[in-house]
């Protein structure tokens, strides 16, 4: 065991799970109640030929998940905020959703969280933040961290992704690299790349607003349990959602016009 520990390299960049480490070509992550469902999903993706997610290797002697390590970079940098990168991300999310088709849409076993009221269509990733997308140069080619995956609609997962990448946020809360982008144009570009249906495009802004209200309530509840969720809440997560709603209301017509 000592030999294993010596070769553990802590992986930074995530904001929720403590103790994510790299060991050789693998990543070790603490297991949680959703781990069996997540591993079944990752195995389904592998069988479906989807290359944009880690493979499950198994569990280690400390009860941690063993996943394959995917080389590349995470987080925002100049080449990850380009139109080209956003288009690739739209294609990646589409390929992922299509690859989940056939996986049972039962709600049991997943972490849970805010959701659409409509019947689920796919297993959404539901947390496609910059820290959870792996890039090689300017191309996002894989997604990691399926802790919040759950049955949902395609559009709910699209809205969650665009929250971070368009981004659907008040400019004061955006990372500097995303501050001066044309959000409406980026919503459209992403939807074109994904191939979002017209009826879903018409519903996108409405669902974004609905999701903010749901997420706010879910995060506030989670924060009462303490831990990293409480830290995120204390760090202003709720206020950022409230400002995003105000920004969305103020720009609704202009954003909607890009989509329809
Ligand atoms: N399979 C993987 N391949 C490469 N890097 C990974 C992998 N899993 C995690 N990482 C790195 O570790 C960071 C934290 O891991 P993550 O699974 O996202 O945990 P958290 O729940 O803390 O967000 C990621 O942002 C990424 O940089
Ligand atoms: Mg993460």
Image: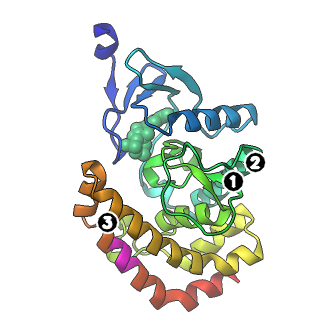
Q: Identify whether 14 is placed above or below 31.
A: below
Q: Does the residue labelled 1 lie within 8 Å of ligand 2?
A: no
Answer left or right for 22 relative to 163: left
- Contact (Cβ within 8 Å) of mark 2 with mark 1: yes
Residue at image coords 47%, 74%: 181
User: Seen in the image, is 46 located left or right of residue 218?
Assistant: right
Using the image, tell me which numbered label, if any, was put on residue 122.
1
Q: Which of marks 2 and 1 is nearer the N terminus?
A: 2
Q: What secondary structure is marked by label 2?
A: loop
The mark nearer the N terminus, 3 or 1, is 1
Taking the image as drawn, is residue 211 in sight? yes
Q: Earlier in the sequence, mark 2 or mark 3?
A: 2
Q: Residue 120's spot in the image, x, y percent?
A: 68, 59
Q: In which quarter of the image is the C terminus?
A: bottom right
Q: Residue at 56% x, 38% y: name it.
A: 38
Q: Can residue 168 be seen in this view?
A: no
**Secondary structure under badge 1?**
strand
Which of 175/62 is in front? 62
Dominant secondary structure, magenta:
helix
**Residue denoted by label 2:** 101
Q: What stretch is highlighted in magenta?
A: 240-244
Please give the residue where the numbered disc 3 appears in the rendered image. 237
């Amino acid at each position: 065991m000592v030999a294993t520990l010596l070769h553990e390299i802590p992986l930074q960049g995530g904001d929720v799970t403590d103790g994510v480490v790299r060991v050789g070509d693998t990543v070790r992550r603490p297991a949680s109640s959703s781990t069996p469902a997540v591993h079944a999903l990752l195995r389904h993706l592998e069988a479906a030929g989807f290359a944009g997610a880690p493979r499950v290797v198994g569990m280690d002697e400390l009860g941690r998940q063993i996943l394959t390590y995917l080389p590349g970079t995470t987080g925002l940098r100049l080449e990850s905020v380009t139109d080209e990168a956003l288009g690739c991300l739209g294609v990646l999310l589409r390929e992922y959703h299509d690859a989940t088709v056939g996986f049972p849409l039962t709600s049991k076993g997943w972490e849970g969280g805010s959701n659409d009221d409509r019947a689920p269509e796919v297993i959404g990733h539901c947390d496609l933040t910059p820290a959870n997308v792996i890039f090689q140069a300017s191309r996002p080619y894989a997604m990691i961290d399926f802790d919040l995956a759950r049955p949902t609609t395609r559009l709910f997962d699209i809205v969650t992704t665009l929250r971070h990448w368009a981004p659907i946020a008040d400019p004061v809360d955006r990372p500097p690299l995303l501050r001066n982008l044309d959000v409406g144009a980026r919503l459209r570009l992403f939807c074109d790349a994904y191939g979002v249906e017209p009826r879903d495009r018409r519903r996108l802004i409405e669902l974004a607003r609905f999701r903010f209200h749901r997420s706010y309530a879910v995060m506030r509840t989670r924060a009462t349990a303490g831990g990293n969720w409480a830290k995120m809440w204390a760090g202003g997560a709720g206020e950022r959602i409230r400002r995003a709603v105000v920004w969305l209301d103020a720009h609704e017509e202009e954003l909607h016009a890009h989509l329809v």
